[in-house]
Image: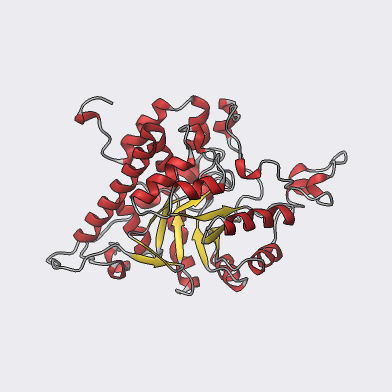
């Protein structure tokens, strides 16, 4: 980039620049969704068709975007979502993202499939304190990751429950995506993730289904979630909830929070958009635990809309990778700053001084 006019001024600018900088294979991995990518589009469409209602003459002191989640204070409700293999975008990978998140006062969720170790990421940024966890077929392997996260100072476990199998990611298939040398899931290295007695370890007999007889036979259940919650003193937040009944059941199992998410449209195509699912989940949760949302957030106005429908905070994934690909840690920090600045402007123009002022009255309800 040369000259001030070429500097990105929105997340859309970063997306365009990132596509030009990433390899075709890496772009297919980060940008792609499941199948025809309808849910990935719906995530964005849901925000675009939600209108805000401006309010006027609401000047005065005392404005703030501050909040507290699980005992930690945050400057704003914009967190970094877990995204795997960030070294595909920048050699420093998740360490650069962690440093940028700390610089912008943003909480960060580190992926189980990060391309750096959870210990290195925690050292790189003080706000990288949430660890995203998949319940593995081996309870011993799962517990090993939990204990490492506890020892490294992580404060929240984010258990992803909506991907017992991979989605049908045709864009990745067409691009022939494979991990290049030097990029791997470092936290799973040398870890036996499958118990010998697990269905995932057994050879498939003739005529068996890989999905039903291998992957789903070893997939986690509600009992596994209850077991995990019983094994740690850290708050466990369940990520990947769209159905209100599932949110209620997660809280009943001991979950300390819920993230409304469809995995960025990367698992089940034509699944409901996260924002569209949020109001019903919020009604079912009824304030008992913090509720977060990811999927489709690209503007500060999106953050306000999510909070108006009941979220306490949002997580941002793909735009973080776009910033990382364009300018490393600086690009990630700039993406977060842009979102925060836009969010504050949206609050001011809808008459909201604090997050407590954001409610459904800020959304235009068509007659």
Of 166 and 150, which appears nearest the observer?
A: 150
Whether residue 84 can be seen here: yes
- Name of the residue lying farthest toward the right: 205
Rendering coords of residue 150 (x, y %): 58, 59
The answer to whether residue 167 of the structure is visible from this angle is: no
Vertical relation: 245 (above or below) 27:
below
Res 239 quadrant in image: bottom right
9 vs 150, nearest the viewer: 150
Residue at 76%, 42% in the rendered image: 210
Classify residue 322 as left or right of residue 8: right
Q: Which image quadrant is residue 166 in?
A: top right
Q: Residue at x 45, y 50 (%)?
A: 295
Q: Please identify the quadrant where the C terminus is shown.
A: bottom left
* Left or right: 158 in relation to 342: right
Quarter of the figure with the N terminus? top left
Q: Is residue 124 left or right of residue 235?
A: left
């Amino acid at each position: 980039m040369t000259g001030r006019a070429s500097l990105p001024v929105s997340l859309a600018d970063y997306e365009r620049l990132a596509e030009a900088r990433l390899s075709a294979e890496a772009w297919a991995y980060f940008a792609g969704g499941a199948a025809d990518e309808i849910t990935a589009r719906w995530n964005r469409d849901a925000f675009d068709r939600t209108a805000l209602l401006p309010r006027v003459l609401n000047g005065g002191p005392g404005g703030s975007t501050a909040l507290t989640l699980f005992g930690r204070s945050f400057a704003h409700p914009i967190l970094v979502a877990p995204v795997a293999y960030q070294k595909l975008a920048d050699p420093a990978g998740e360490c650069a993202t962690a440093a940028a998140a700390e610089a912008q006062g943003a909480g960060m969720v580190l992926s189980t499939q990060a391309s750096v170790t959870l210990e290195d990421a925690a050292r790189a940024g003080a706000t990288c304190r949430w660890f995203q966890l998949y319940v593995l077929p081996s309870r011993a392997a799962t517990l090993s990751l939990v204990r490492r996260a506890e020892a490294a100072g992580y404060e929240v476990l984010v258990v992803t429950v909506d991907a017992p199998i991979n989605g049908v990611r045709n864009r990745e298939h067409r691009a022939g995506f494979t991990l290049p040398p030097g990029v791997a899931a470092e936290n799973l290295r040398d870890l036996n993730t499958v118990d010998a007695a697990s269905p995932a370890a057994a050879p498939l007999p003739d005529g068996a289904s890989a999905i039903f007889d291998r992957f789903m036979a070893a997939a986690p259940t509600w009992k596994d979630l209850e077991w995990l919650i019983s094994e740690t003193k850290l708050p466990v937040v369940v990520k990947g909830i769209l159905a209100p009944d599932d949110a209620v059941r997660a809280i009943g199992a001991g979950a300390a929070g819920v993230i409304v998410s469809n995995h960025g449209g990367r698992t089940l195509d034509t699944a409901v958009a996260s924002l569209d699912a949020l109001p019903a989940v919020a009604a079912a949760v009824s304030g008992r635990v913090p509720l977060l949302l990811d999927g489709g957030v690209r503007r500060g106005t999106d953050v306000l809309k999510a909070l108006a429908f009941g979220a306490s905070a949002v997580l941002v994934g793909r735009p973080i990778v776009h910033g990382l690909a364009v300018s490393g840690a600086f690009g990630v920090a700039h993406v977060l700053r842009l979102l925060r600045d836009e969010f504050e402007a949206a609050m001011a123009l809808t008459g909201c001084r604090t997050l407590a002022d954001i409610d459904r009255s800020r959304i235009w309800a068509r007659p």
